[in-house]
């Protein structure tokens, strides 16, 4: 299909570039910044401009590029929702959010309090679409024990992690004293560098995490899974000959994960969930099939993680493994268990792309 005629002048294009460069939340100084901007645009507008298009738009890739009408329209929307949207309401919301995560009317909140989780979820949804607000509240939340526990630990958001949320995790690390919390945040920053394809910082973070890990510690399955996600991906890129050894370790650790513990998200196979993600990235399809089947068959399904779509994600990993080992017919049987509408907001676009990949491989 031919592009629509671009009705704007070069002068307006230059203005858009200048506004985003000088007043935006993502610094556009190097080609690598274009990936972060692409993530940020999606997080703010729910629309996609590819990293390569942004590189051409800002002149990092020399070509006879002329931006499409749709590209300009999305950039205009992005500007209006971030740079120009600095109303006084943001100041009121800032105070409300900070007060919410620093409550004075009670001393302690149980980490498993579902009512409080629901309120935090509403706030997290608002924050992800308002980077101006996030810039103002990220430090107070990271310095607050409640903010760390109920925002940063519950809502690591892959759709905004590389764009701006990572800044909050850097501050989180400066304030968190627990070993488990520090390991968790370092693993999140590893994934930021992975998404950015920044292999220098990726290796540095991988080595730091391996050094930090204490195999004798008791970790929540979600944190332990993130550690092995990092361990596998880092080993694949920097010590590939040791992958088989790490995978064997994964299955030894897997056997020790409790199947019947209920409190605070222990009722979901969180270890398996994050390790499946790593196995997908490193093309270990047989191991991915085996681990995803254990997660789906040996753990009782939790209502919370049903509505969050996490089992859909596990069926998706299982299907991707099947189709990549030549069992497309079996993979097709899983489609009825996968509904992209169920995908939880903090990874919705991430898993939609995996679902599209599955569909391509099945067709």
Image (cartoon, rainbow, N blue to C red):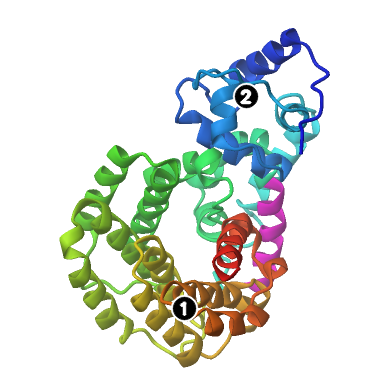
Q: How far across and how far down the image is residue 103, in percent?
A: 64, 54
| Residue ID at (60%, 22%) | 57
- What is the total number of numbered labels drawn onto the structure image? 2
Q: Residue at x 69, y 24 (%)?
A: 67
Query: Residue placed at 54% from the left, 17% from the top?
Result: 59
As rendered, which of 62 and 140 lies closer to the eye? 62
- Residue corresponding to mark 1: 322
Mark 2 — residue? 24
Q: Position of residue 176 (x, y in %)?
A: 39, 51
Q: Residues within 10 Å of mark 1 (few under 14, many from 20)?
A: many
Image quadrant where residue 50 sits: top right
Quadrant (top left, top right, bottom left, bottom right) of the N terminus: top right
> Which secondary structure is most common in the magenta stretch?
helix
- Looking at marks 1 and 2 on the same chain, the residue that comes earlier in the sequence is marked by 2
Magenta span includes 243: no
Q: Which residues are magenta?
A: 113-127
């Amino acid at each position: 299909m031919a592009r629509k005629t671009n009705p704007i002048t070069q002068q307006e294009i230059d203005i858009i570039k200048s506004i985003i460069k000088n007043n935006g939340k993502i610094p556009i100084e190097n080609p690598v910044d274009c990936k972060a901007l692409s993530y940020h645009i999606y997080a703010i507008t729910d629309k996609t401009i590819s990293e390569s298009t942004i590189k051409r738009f800002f002149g990092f890739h020399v070509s006879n590029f002329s931006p499409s009408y749709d590209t300009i329209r999305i950039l205009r929307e992005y500007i209006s929702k971030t740079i120009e949207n600095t109303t006084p309401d943001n100041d009121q919301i800032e105070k409300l959010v900070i007060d919410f995560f620093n409550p004075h009317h009670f001393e302690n909140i149980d980490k498993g309090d579902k009512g409080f989780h629901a309120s935090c979820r509403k706030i997290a949804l608002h924050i992800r679409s308002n980077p101006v607000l996030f810039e103002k509240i990220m430090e107070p939340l990271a310095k607050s024990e409640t903010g760390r526990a109920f925002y940063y630990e519950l809502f690591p958001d892959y759709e905004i992690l590389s764009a701006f949320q990572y800044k909050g995790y850097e501050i989180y690390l400066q304030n968190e004293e627990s070993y488990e919390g520090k390991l968790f945040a370092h693993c999140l920053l590893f994934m930021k560098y992975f998404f950015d394809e920044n292999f220098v910082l990726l290796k540095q973070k991988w080595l730091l995490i391996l050094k930090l890990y204490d195999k004798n510690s008791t970790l929540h399955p979600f944190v332990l899974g993130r550690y092995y996600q990092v361990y596998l991906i880092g080993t694949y890129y920097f010590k590939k000959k040791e992958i088989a050894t790490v995978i064997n370790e994964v299955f030894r650790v897997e056997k020790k994960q409790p199947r019947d513990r209920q409190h605070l998200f222990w009722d979901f196979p969180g270890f398996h969930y994050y390790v499946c993600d790593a196995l997908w990235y490193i093309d270990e399809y047989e191991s991915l099939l085996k681990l995803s089947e254990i997660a789906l068959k040996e753990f009782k399904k939790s209502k919370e993680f049903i509505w969050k779509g996490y089992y859909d994600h596990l069926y998706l990993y299982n299907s991707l493994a099947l189709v990549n080992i030549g069992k497309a017919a079996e993979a097709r049987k899983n489609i009825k268990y996968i509904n992209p509408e169920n995908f939880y907001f903090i990874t919705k676009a991430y898993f939609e792309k995996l679902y599209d990949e599955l569909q391509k491989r099945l067709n």
